[in-house]
Image (cartoon, rainbow, N blue to C red):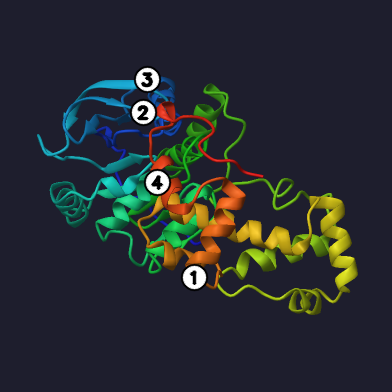
């Protein structure tokens, strides 16, 4: 993944100002992981290199998805927006934040040269405002399929973070610390980035192009035969128009009996069942993370009709897509359990 040769923002004589826009239900871990390397950098240099004022939609307190509340935030539209970076912090249901006032404010910041960043699903909020077209971006792996479906003019990566000109995006969680450390490295040098990483006990400086999930775990672990991994990759890349099993074995240059045996031994199910589950997993992401009509989701995941899709979906998850769309958008702490049955 290409990355800009220069980092937006400034960390010269004045402190680099990073506006932290907290949207209701934001990812608390990502926010704290992002700001702590800057705190460490300030401490280690004994000078305020960075500052990070908290903003919100309405001002006052904002509660994260895990119940942690950050109080006394500034309303985003109040006061001067003298930021070097504006970081949008989102988690569940980023589609809720498409208000005209917020979008116009984000566009004005972009026109004024403020670098815009998104943590976790923050890239969705920027994309809804029309600010990610033609850029590279990342979101949490759970939301990649939905982002690609909604914003095909943005090049979606599956890495930890991306710095592309004046847009910075990160998959969230602890990877937010990696993006912060990369900003420090580019602005202040490798020595301070290493020192800040060591100070917060971050294992190492991870590169932007490292994958979100270790290769030893995806798709079924590297103890599995290479042909099985290749088969699963082919399945994942052919969802809208699923390959027939005979086409799979032709591409893999193995017999159907070999393919069946590999799947039974290493996954416990047949290739057909595994393929259907891959398509259903993608469908569930689109159902719970977008407002796409169910018939469009069915087509995007290779199901011939909405009726067939609904029946198969209920058999896998225990409830029909329309009901899952409602229940999965209830804040996690208020759900009745189990919200769905995955088998």
Residue 112 location in percent, x, y? 17, 53
Q: Secondary structure at mark 4?
A: loop
Q: Secondary structure at mark 2?
A: loop
Q: Secondary structure at mark 3?
A: loop
> Residue drawn at (39%, 30%), measured in percent from left and top?
65
From the image, tell me which residue sits under label 2. Answer: 64
- CA–CA distance between discs 3 and 1? 57 Å
- CA–CA distance between discs 1 and 2? 34 Å
Q: Secondary structure at mark 1?
A: helix
* Label 1 packing within 10 angstroms: few (<14), some (14-19), many (20+): some
Answer with mark 3 or mark 1, whichever residue precedes in sequence.
Answer: 3
From the image, tell me which residue sits under label 4. Answer: 121
From the image, tell me which residue sits under label 1. Answer: 299
Q: Is residue 144 visible?
A: yes
Residue 33 location in percent, x, y? 46, 30
Determine which of the numbered discs, if any, sits on residue 46 in the image: 3
Tag 4–tag 3 contact (CB < 8 Å): no
> Residue drawn at (43%, 47%), measured in percent from left and top?
323
> Residue drawn at (78%, 78%), measured in percent from left and top?
246
- CA–CA distance between discs 2 and 4? 13 Å
């Amino acid at each position: 993944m290409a990355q800009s040769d220069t980092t937006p923002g400034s960390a010269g004589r004045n402190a680099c100002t990073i506006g932290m826009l907290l949207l209701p239900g934001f990812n608390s871990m990502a926010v704290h992981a992002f700001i702590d390397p800057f705190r460490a950098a300030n401490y280690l240099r004994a000078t305020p290199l960075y500052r990070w004022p908290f903003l919100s939609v309405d001002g006052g307190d904002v509660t994260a998805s895990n119940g942690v509340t950050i109080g006394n935030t500034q309303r985003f539209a109040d006061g001067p927006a003298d930021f070097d970076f504006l970081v949008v912090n989102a988690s569940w249901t980023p589609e809720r934040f498409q208000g005209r006032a917020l979008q116009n404010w984000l566009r004005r910041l972009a026109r004024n040269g403020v670098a815009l960043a998104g943590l976790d699903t923050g890239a969705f909020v920027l994309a809804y405002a029309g600010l990610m077209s033609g850029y590279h971006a990342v979101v949490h792996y759970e939301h990649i399929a939905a982002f690609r479906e909604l914003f095909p003019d943005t090049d979606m990566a599956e890495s930890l973070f991306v710095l592309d000109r004046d847009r910075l995006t990160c998959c969230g969680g602890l990877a937010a610390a990696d993006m912060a450390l990369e900003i420090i490295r580019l602005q202040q040098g490798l020595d301070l980035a290493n020192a800040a990483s060591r100070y917060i006990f971050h294992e190492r400086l991870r590169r932007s192009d490292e994958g979100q999930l270790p290769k030893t775990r995806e798709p079924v672990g590297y103890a599995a035969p290479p042909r099985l991994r290749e088969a699963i990759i082919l399945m994942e890349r052919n969802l809208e128009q699923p390959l027939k099993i005979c086409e799979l074995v032709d591409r893999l240059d193995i017999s159907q009996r070999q393919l069946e045996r590999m799947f039974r031994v290493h996954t416990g199910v047949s290739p057909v069942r595994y393929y259907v589950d891959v398509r259903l997993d993608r469908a569930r992401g689109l159902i719970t993370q977008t407002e796409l009509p169910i018939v469009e989701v069915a087509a995007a995941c290779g199901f011939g009709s909405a009726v067939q899709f609904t029946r198969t979906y209920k058999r896998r998850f225990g409830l029909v897509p329309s009901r899952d769309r409602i229940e999965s958008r209830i804040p996690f702490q208020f759900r009745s359990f189990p919200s769905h049955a995955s088998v």
